[in-house]
Amino acid sequence: MNKRIFLTLISLILVLAVLTTGCAKAASGDQSLKKVQDAKTLVLGLDDAFPPMGYRNESNDIVGFDVDVAKEVAKRMGVELKLQPIDWSQKFNELNAGTIDCIWNGYTITEERLQETNVTSAYMKNRQIVIVLADSPVQSLADLAGKKLALQAESSAAEALESKPDFKASLGEVIELKDNVTALLDLKASGSDALLVDEIVAGYYIAREGKQYRILDEALAEEEYGVGFRKADQALRDEVQKQLEAMAKDGTLAKISTEWFSKDITTIGK
Amino acid sequence: MVTFQILPYLLEGTWRALQIFILTLVFSIPLGIVIARLRQSTVRIIQLPVRFYLLIMRGTPLILQLIFFMYFPPFVLGIPIGRFTAVILAFSLNYAAYFAEIFRGGLESIPRGQFEAGHVLGFSSGQTFTRIILPQVIKRILPPSASEAMTLIKDTALAQIIGVAELFRAAQNSTSRLVSIEPIIAAGVIYLILNSLVALVFSRFEKKLSYYRH
């Protein structure tokens, strides 16, 4: 009998402990910005195989347009930027587990993502475009009926496709691949007939690979990039938003954009 | 040849893969021995949880276990766990389950009569185990253990799902930048070299222990 009382007491204490820590967290309000400032680091989660927004260069450093912008934002916030490569399919898990502070890597603003995360206003426009091999007979989206379309799993391309159920139904097969380059190699090897991908990303590959590919004139969806934060992290999101606006105003954003895309294609504050 | 240009990067990934390999063996082999002994217990309260553990670890994908150990503790308990720690935890618990069953198979292949014979010859049960049973068990479990170790080398590629940049991830990143499958082939060659070494070490070991065969 004694043992039972002891066990009940222990479980009561445990339950109380869990409850009180829960309350303590809820009562302390939005500490997101303070936490980053105290730690003096902003942890940015990215898919480091996503050129030209964030990828590894010849010397294995993570570079890219988003990386350069984020570095400048961190500098202005007086914190250090830590680039944390993640698996793109795990981005919400990473954010919710607190292992990263933000998702900043060609993060397309979508309905679903607005519900999952707290996103800054858009800093760049993007389209979901379709790439085919240069000698492919496919000229329009309608020509893709019954054909195989490749895309990156868990990407905004996948969401763009979901938003066009008629087009999706017309396709023969949708092939979800791990990253865009695998999808591109798949296209090259004729494993698929077309690739649905971000225009910004496609630009990098086409610039590299040249005339092997052709972009269809018809685009699937117009969309925009933003920076994603945890839903509760309003203060941190506002601070980054403020810095981005300041950088747009003093021309820093235009300068970084010109370095990467040879023109200013940013949209914040415009 | 871009392979030479990206080799330092691939080697960095190789070192990461080797760290996972070594640490997993260091933790999972002793753990496997303990689990094998517990699994042999006739006490139900010991045997049943162990069987449940073996079922979970062998019955769900390792990639799922990796995601679980990385994101479940911080999300539910509020305790962050390092990426690398999560990898080692998941790999060690997973491989301990497989090693445990290999060890148990080895232990149970020794006829009971040998324990009795040892007792009759005046050995204590501890001596019987370490001097008579164990040397035979080790010989028998070497071939399946070698296969398990080789599988482990290849499984290290799964660690990338929680953001640990091992060899395969390094190769894929290079592939992304260069739009070429050459880095993947180079990684394949590295895996093959590593596993040739593992196979070699095990076959040397086997030869060394085959003292009764001529």
Image (tube, coloured by chain):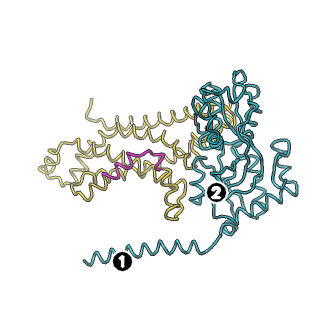
What residue is pinned by disc 2?
A: A117
**Number of the label disc, if any, that sits on residue A91:** none
* Quarter of the picture holding the C terminus of chain B: top left
Are the numbered discs 2 and 1 placed on the same chain, yes or no?
yes
In the image: residue A172, left or right of residue A36: left
Foreground pick, B59 / A12? A12
Query: Residue, x 66% and y 37% (percent of image)?
Result: B176
* Residue range corresponding to the magenta coloring: B51-65
Q: For residue B52: magenta?
A: yes
User: Chain letter for cyan?
Assistant: A
Q: Is residue B15 above or below residue B206?
A: below
Q: Is residue B12 above or below residue A78?
A: above
Query: Residue, x 40% and y 40% (percent of image)?
Result: B148
| In front: label 2 or label 1 | 2
What residue is pinned by disc 1?
A: A9
Query: Residue B71: image x %, image y %?
Result: 52, 56
Residue A72's quadrant in the figure?
bottom right
Q: Residue furthest front?
A: A166
Query: Residue A112: image x %, image y %?
Result: 62, 51
Kind of residue at badge 2: Thr
Query: Residue B147: image x %, image y %?
Result: 39, 37
Q: Is residue A201 visible?
A: yes
Q: Spatial distance from mark 2 to mark 1, Cα to Cα?
A: 40 Å
Q: For residue B112: magenta?
A: no
Q: Secondary structure at mark 2?
A: strand
* Quarter of the picture holding the N terminus of chain B: top right
Query: Residue A42: image x %, image y %?
Result: 69, 60
Q: Is residue B10 visible?
A: no
In the image: residue B34, left or right of residue B7: left
The color chain B is rendered in: yellow
Mark nearer the N terminus (2 vs 1): 1
